[in-house]
Amino acid sequence: MKWGVQVVKPSTYNNGSTSVLVQFSSGRYLFNCGEGTQRLSFENKTRLSKLTSVFLTRVDWESMGGLPGMLLTLADAGTRDLVIHGGHNLTHAMAATRHFILRSDMGVGVRELRDGDAGAEYADENVRVQPVHIYPDGYTASAAELGPDESAAAATRRELLARAFGVCREPQAGRKRREPVPQGVKKGYYGQECREAAIAGTLQRLEQRGDEAAKKRVRGGSRGRGSTELLPATAPTPGVVCYVVTGPEVPGKFDPQAARALGLKPGPHYARLVKGESVVTADGTEIRPEQCVGPVRPSSRVVIVDCPTPAYVASVVESPRLAALLAGGAEAGPRLALVVHALGPGVAQDARYRAWAARFPAHVQHVVSAPEFVADNNPFQRHLRIHTALSAVDPRTYVTPQAAGSAELQPRAFIDGARVVAASSLLGFDIEPQPRLDESLVVPLLTPAEMRAKMQLDGAEPEPAAAGDEGELAVCAIGTGSSVPSIYRNVSGNVVSV
């Protein structure tokens, strides 16, 4: 068995949320999907094809700004089911996207994690994810945040959300994932097939009837009953959800030599022993699994802590659920392997938080994703390359973007002498088969000046415009004009200079 964690997007001064991907061969789990997450995944070739669940630490733009666009991409790629987990107001936020996202072929489930619900956790054949709620100083959670919301307003939000998506079949242990939808068959808001020929045929019939109003509805995509129904009002809440991710137990290693010594031959008996079942040999001898299968290794844990401002530090360090992970012994449960610190400005330098983080067992790996520790460079290096080339041609139109170049602080300033590393895109940590930090995929981010120097060495920098060309007409295309995500831009435009 192999599974691990990969940083998709670290937190910087320009990007306030951290996105982390937990990866198994049979499924992937994304924690936070801020603006640019999908584009950065294309840039770095991060695979999201087997994404089954998204976990949000906050219901705000920083943590979920990229989610609507990613849902469209996943639906068009044939994804059948996706479960989104988060705090209070998550259903409201997702229902607000109903005019933008209409994908009845993809089932989307929304689970609001209540602080007062002891069973508010997610579990499937790979992971068990437990939420830990934290709040800023002086804030008291409302009744709606602590318990289930059965109000009429909540029912309206769920109904409006259901109109945009199909029914989600949530993953469960032992249940196989549904196969992706074939690309040739997509359906509209209420299940109508959206084949081009079907739309053309409908328009032709309406042409014969002379129904101009109906033709406009077909061309524009009728939103159907209730599309103009307003969402009930709500109010934002400052609650944040941290997550404790527990992986599966690792089965013991089968010893074929011990099995042969007991009189067994390769075949079905081997498979039954690996599954934990006893078998009987031809002479009637019972062979138990422990006679030729090694002991089961306990599960490992990963903790994702989101602390957006110093006002949340007290709630983190005083959380009983997080405090239980500090012991590190057998009484603490599965072995803790990794802590991802997704921190806002000033938190990583808070003495209270640093003292709390230093109390974790010595074997735990720390990944700190905080603006002070992550260089604020452009993560979209391919776009930077094009922009740098255009800036060499017309520096007034294509202004060179700013970049920090290096981080303000080094990781050792966070926890002295501990196993700590600053977050970066594609930084990985393998949990199984052996815990280890993997920096092999991390690519250094060039500043605009470094990119320009590299392009000069490569001979790729274009020549500046000639002095006598100012009076000519120049048309410059910007963007890709594509309807699918791009590693460069997802919009198009033209600059006409006369």
Image (spheres, rainbow, N blue to C red):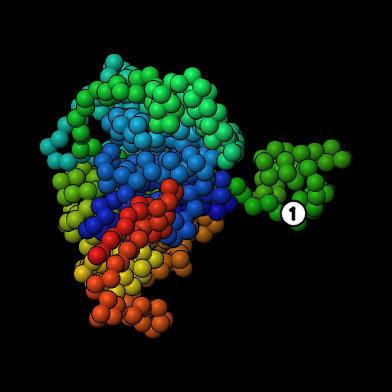
The answer to whether residue 325 is left or right of residue 255 is left
Query: What number of labels is visible?
Result: 1
Instruction: Please determine whether, in this image, residue 417 is positioned above or below residue 223.
Output: below
The answer to whether residue 259 is left or right of residue 436 is right
Q: Residue at x 70, y 38 (%)?
A: 277
The residue lying toward the viewer, choosing from 477 and 170, is: 477
The residue lying toward the viewer, choosing from 144 and 495, is: 495
Neighbourhood count class around disc 1 (C-alpha, 10 Å): few under 14, some 14–19, many 20 upward: some
Locate residue 261, reporting x and y percent: 79, 53
The answer to whether residue 230 is left or right of residue 110 is left
Q: Does dot 1 land on a helix, a strand or a loop?
A: helix
Which quadrant, please, contains the C terminus? bottom left
Locate residue 460, reporting x and y percent: 40, 78
Locate residue 398, reporting x and y percent: 26, 67
Q: Which residue is mark 1?
A: 256
Q: Residue at x 52, y 30 (%)?
A: 199
Question: Can you tell which quarter of the image residue 424 is in?
Answer: bottom left
The residue lying toward the viewer, choosing from 40 and 481, is: 481
Instruction: Please determine whether, in this image, residue 65 is positioned above or below residue 224.
Output: below
Q: Residue at x 52, y 55 (%)?
A: 432
Instruction: Please determine whether, in this image, residue 4 is positioned above or below residue 110.
Output: below
Q: Residue at x 40, y 69 (%)?
A: 443
Question: Can you tell which quarter of the image residue 475 is in?
Answer: bottom left
The answer to whether residue 334 is left or right of residue 288 is left
Confirm whether residue 142 shows in the render.
yes
